[in-house]
Structures are given as structure tokens and as C-alpha cells.
Image (cartoon, grey):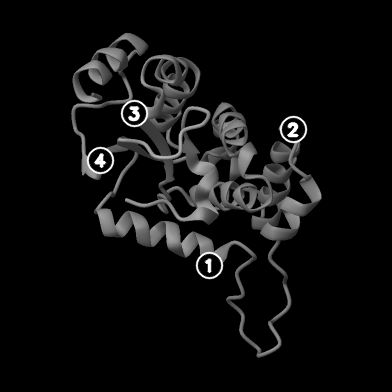
Amino acid sequence: MALAPKFGGQKLAAAGTYQAVHTIELYLDYVCPFSKKMFKTIYEDVFPVVDKKYGSKVQFIFRQQIQPWHPSSILTHEAGVAVLKLAPEKFYPFSAALFDKQTDFFDVNAVHDSRNQTYERLSKLAGSVGVDEKEILKLLWVNDKPASDGSLNIGNAVTDDMKLLVKAARLTGVHVSPTVLFNGIVENSISSGMTKEQWDEWLQKNVT
């Protein structure tokens, strides 16, 4: 699937790579423990190998998989979209920081926070990786006043982009995280439990 320029920060490819032969799409949810495991393995261990051995042959795309049965999933992915808007080059560092702190946004730890309070915490996390905390919060904040036309479901500055992410997942039929697509097709042989060595073996077989 093509990647819209506005979501360009989701692309993880070797420096100087403009066109990849193979595309690995990772449908991950920030509050899914298995997504965290897969992200950390790929970001910390696998991608350095890819950069050296497969450079121009493959690219990874982090597809934000919103799972609404985890209420905080929506809010955390909104923060990811806000980072993409302001500083796309910080998307992966922010995602790494958010996965490290994901339990802070699990149901039991977030149940007493209002929506905007959660946004404040997410904005501080973005600030910790060098993104303007105040600007992130501006994009996320939901006003408690009706819009000029009287509407009450006003959303925030990233709502329209969130709709596109949901639509993309629906078009591919992805339901849960983590789900991996290889060249546009669901690849069931890849799991969150794969090690660096298993990834390298898989890549040797499939990336030519």
C-alpha cells in the first residue's frame, strides 16, 4: 500500500533509499504488549541489520493500528499523528518512548484521567524526545465549548488524519495488532516472538 506524504514519518528505510523493492508494514498499537515487543525487536535489533545487509531492497512502515476496545489506544495514536504533523523525524523516537511507558496508559492507570489530562501526559512524553510539548498539546486539546455552528463533537486538530488511519486498516482487513503485511499481503509467519536471528533468516529467504 502506498504511503501518503503526511504520514511519511512512519517510514523506516536506509539512508538514501528512495524506492524499496519490498515493503514490510507493521500494524502496531501503542497499548498492545505484543506490539511493543515487535517494535523493540525491529527498531533496536533488526533494522540495524537491514540497514547494513538489505539497504535499498526493503523498507518498514509503522501502520498505527487503533484498537478502540483499549480507550487509551485512540488517544495515544492521536499523539503519534500530532508528532507526524510537527516533527515527522521524531516519530520513531516518540514511538519508542511511548512503548517504554505504555503501561502508564493501560486501563487501570488511565481510568481516572480526563481526555485532556491524558493529552497533557502524552505531550510531555513528546517533549522528552525533542518535540515542542506546547504545540503537540495544541493539536490534541479538545475544547469544552461548542463550535461556531453549535456542533458538540468537535474533535481536535488530528481527527481528520485519524480517520484516514482507520480507513487504511479497514481497507486491508487488519483487525488486531500486531499484524504484518509483506508487499501488501498478510504474512502470518511473522510473530512478535521472533528474535533478531529469526528475522535475519526470514529476510534472507524473502528479500532478494
Q: Report if residue 31 is visible in the image.
A: no
Q: Using the numbered discs, state the Cα–Cα distance from disc 2 to disc 3 in whole angstroms.
A: 33 Å
Between discs 1 and 3, the one toward the N terminus: 3
Specify the amino acid type for callout 2. Ser
Q: Which residue is drawn at 57% across and 53% down?
A: 78
**Residue 41: percent from the left, percent from the top?**
43, 19
Q: Which residue lies furthest to the bottom in this view?
A: 149
Amino acid type at mark 4: Asn
Residue that sits furthest to the top in the current view: 197
Residue 57's label in the rendered image is 3
Please name the residue that numbered disc 4 is placed on. 183
User: Label 1: few (<14), some or many (≥20) within 10 Å?
Assistant: few
The three-letter amino acid code for the residue at tag 3 is Lys
Residue 160 numbered mark, or none: 1
Q: What element carries label 3?
A: helix
State the CA–CA distance, disc 2 to disc 1. Answer: 26 Å
Residue 134 % position (x, y): 80, 51
Q: Relative to 27, is 116 on the left or the right?
A: right
| Element marked by disc 4 | loop
Residue drawn where x is 61% and y is 75% of the image: 154
CA distance for labels 1 and 3: 33 Å
Circle 4 residues within 10 Å: few <14, some 14–19, many ≥20: some
For image coordinates 32% across by 9% down, the residue present is 197
Q: Is residue 125 above or below residue 69?
A: above
Q: Earlier in the sequence, mark 1 or mark 4?
A: 1
Q: Earlier in the sequence, mark 4 or mark 2?
A: 2
